[in-house]
Image: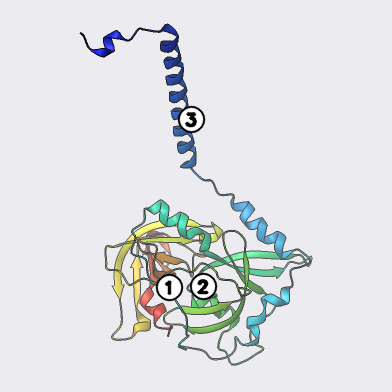
Amino acid sequence: MGNSRDNIPLDPSSFYNAIINMKKILFLLSFALCCVSFSHGQEYMDEDALFMNLVKQVRSPEFNLEDYGKFYETVHLNRENRKVSIKTLQPSKKVLSRNELFKQNRPHVYRFVRVFLNSQGARMIENIGTAFPISEDGYFSLNEHMTALWDAGSGDPEAANREHYYFLADYDGNILPIDSVCTYNAQADVAIVKADTKGKKITAFRLGNDLDVGEDVFIIAHPRAYLYYFSTGMINRMLQKGDNIYSRKMEISADYAGGSSGGPIFDNKGNITGMVSLTQSFYYDQKNYKNLQMVVKQAIPVSVIKAFIN
C-alpha cells in the first residue's frame, strides 16, 4: 500500500479555492505591510499653525494679559544663588534612537514667548527663547540672560519694562504663565522660574549627569523661531575656573543660534545633560568681523543647574 497522500483524490474545486484563499492571504499581508510603512512614514510639522495657535489664544477675549505679568511683583528681589527645593525625576537608563529621543521629548520643549501691543493696539507675540521643565509642578530651567529682560534682582520694583508680558508654551500650545523668578546666577547663565500649571502635573525632563569630551549630545530648540529644530553633535571641551562650579562650561558641536537660549541638551537616554547658553564667532579678521571661520557653541553642564536645587 502506498503513501496515504497518494490515495487522496484531486478535487479541482478544492484546488481553485486554495488558490483564491492564498491570494487573499497575500493581499492582506501586502495591506498590512503597507499600513506599517505608512505608520512609520515621515511626519511633517506645520510651523505656521503652531505659531497661529498661540496668536489666536492671545487675541481671544478670555486671555487676560495681567495674568502673564505676575512675576513683575517680585522680580526685583535679590534671589541670586538661592537654593530651591525641587522634586526632580530620576534619570533614565534606556538608550534611545535619535528618532525616539526627538519624538519623546519634542512635545515638552517649551517656547519662551513675549506678548506686546503693536502700533494699532493689536496683541502680537514673538518667540524669543526656549525653556524646559525640570519638575512636574512647574519649575523650569532657562538662561539668566533671559531673566535680565526683566531686570531681575535690581532691587527697584519699577525697573522692569512692564509693557511686555511673557509665557511658556509647549508643542500643543498649552500656555503657562510665569509666577516668579526663583534663583539665578549671571556667570553660570542659569535661572529657574516657577510657572503656574493650574494644579496640573506636567511632563518634566529628567536631570542626568555631565558627559565627557567626545560623547554625543542632542538639542531641541527654536533658533530664530525655527521651531523644534533638532540638532546633534558631540562635546568638544569641558571647562572650569578653579573650584568655581558656576564657571563650568561645555562646548559642543551641535548647532544652535539666537532663540535657542535655554534649550535642553540631552544625552542618548533623553536625560538633561546641559542647557544652551551662547555662541562665539571666530573670524580671520576678528577686528572687522570678516571671513567667518568657526562658531563655538558654549553651553552649561547639568551639574551647574543642579547646584541651584536642594
Q: Is residue 152 left or right of residue 231?
A: right
Q: Is residue 34 left or right of residue 65?
A: left
Q: Where is 36 relative to 138, above or below?
A: above
**How many numbered marks does the figure carry?**
3
| Most distant residue in the front direction | 1
Kindly tell me whether residue 161 is visible in this rendering. Answer: no
Task: Locate residue 229, reporting x and y percent.
Answer: 48, 56
Q: Where is 280 relative to 190, above or below?
A: above
Q: Circle 2 sits in a helix, a strand or a loop, which is it?
A: loop
What is the CA distance from the residue labelled 1 to the residue labelled 3?
42 Å
Q: Circle 1 sits in a helix, a strand or a loop, which is it?
A: loop
Q: Residue 161 falls in which quadrant of the image?
A: bottom right
Task: Locate residue 189, reporting x and y percent.
Answer: 45, 78
Look at the numbered discs 1 and 2 and tell me whether their residues touch, using CB distance below 8 Å: yes
The disc labelled 2 sits on which kind of residue?
A: Glu
- Which mark identifies residue 224? none
Q: What residue is shown with label 1?
A: 89
Which of 89 and 188 lies nearest the eye of the viewer?
A: 89
| Most distant residue in the left direction | 1
Q: Residue 244 falls in which quadrant of the image?
A: bottom left
Q: What residue is shown with label 3?
A: 31
Label whose residue precedes the other's in the sequence (3 or 2) = 3
Label whose residue precedes the other's in the sequence (1 or 3) = 3
Image quarter (top left, top right, bottom left or bottom right) of the C terminus: bottom left
Kindly tell me whether residue 274 is visible in this rendering. Answer: yes
The disc labelled 3 sits on which kind of residue?
A: Phe
Query: Local crowd at mark 3 within 10 Å, few (<14), some, or many (≥20)?
Result: few
- Which mark identifies residue 136? 2
Q: Residue at x 59, y 49 (%)?
A: 46
Label whose residue precedes the other's in the sequence (1 or 2) = 1
